[in-house]
Amino acid sequence: MKVIVFGATGSLGRNITEQALEAGYEVTAFARRPEALDFEHSRMRKVSGDIFDAEQVRQALKGQDAAIVAVGAGARGQVRSIGTANVIAGMKAEGVRRLIALSTLGAGDSRGKLNFFWRYIMFGLLLRRAMADHEQQEAWVRSSDLDWTIIRPAAFSDEPCESKFHHGSLEGVVDLALRVPRRDVARFMVKQVEDSSYLLAAPALSC
């Protein structure tokens, strides 16, 4: 099975790429500077491209079975929303159905899971633009008519969960740590490629 990872050189994208290879997939690592992935693999193809370039995105999607969007904020702004819109258009043009898109805990109906600091200081003030980008990204995904899953992780961490790794609506879960290990997020996203448990849903992830 062929999976393309957009944003493959980011801190999460690299983990996703490694996890996808471990899962046995043929992986296309799409990034502006894919050489930043300082390893090679017989089932990995590196593609240099700009997610803002719709034609480059479409060409990279040829022959793929699933797409994972894990792009970061970037310096140019609206990378997530514009980039995801280009991925969706490319997927439709090339007949690719499965889309797993990275968003954030706090977007959409998960806002109530945040504490005061994250809800009003971080996303309400300091990261307002980033949250608006996530919201637009999610809107594109939801209206895409693809087989999508939106992933909403808490703040990334390199430390393992001290107790349980939570995923889903998080209803009834108290005392969320509001952080989650990158490796666990990557593993969860790769699992969605062939798992329909969260098809057309937006599970939240947190320790």
Image (tube, rainbow, N blue to C red):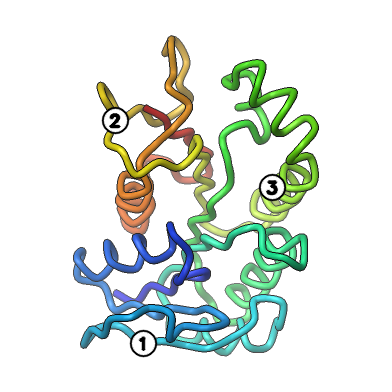
**Mark 1 Cα-neighbour bin, 10 Å: few <14, some 14–19, many ≥20:** some
Report which residue position mark 3 lands on.
134
**Mark 2 Cα-neighbour bin, 10 Å: few <14, some 14–19, many ≥20:** some
Tell me residue 137's x, y (percent): 69, 53
Displayed quadrant of residue 42: bottom left
Q: What's the mark number on residue 161?
A: 2
Q: Residue 137 or 157: which is nearer the viewer? A: 157
Left or right: residue 128 versus residue 147 is right
Q: Name the residue type under label 1.
A: Arg
Q: Residue 123 or 135: which is nearer the viewer? A: 123
Q: Earlier in the sequence, mark 2 or mark 3?
A: 3
Please state, as top left, top right, bottom left or bottom right, where the C terminus lies in the image.
top left
Cα–Cα gap, marks 1 and 2? 32 Å
Q: Name the residue type under label 3.
A: His
Q: Which of marks 1 and 2 is nearer the N terminus?
A: 1
Report which residue position mark 1 lands on.
45
Q: Residue at x 58, y 74 (%)?
A: 91
Tell me residue 156's x, y (percent): 45, 42
Cα–Cα gap, marks 3 and 1? 28 Å
Q: Name the residue type under label 2.
A: Cys
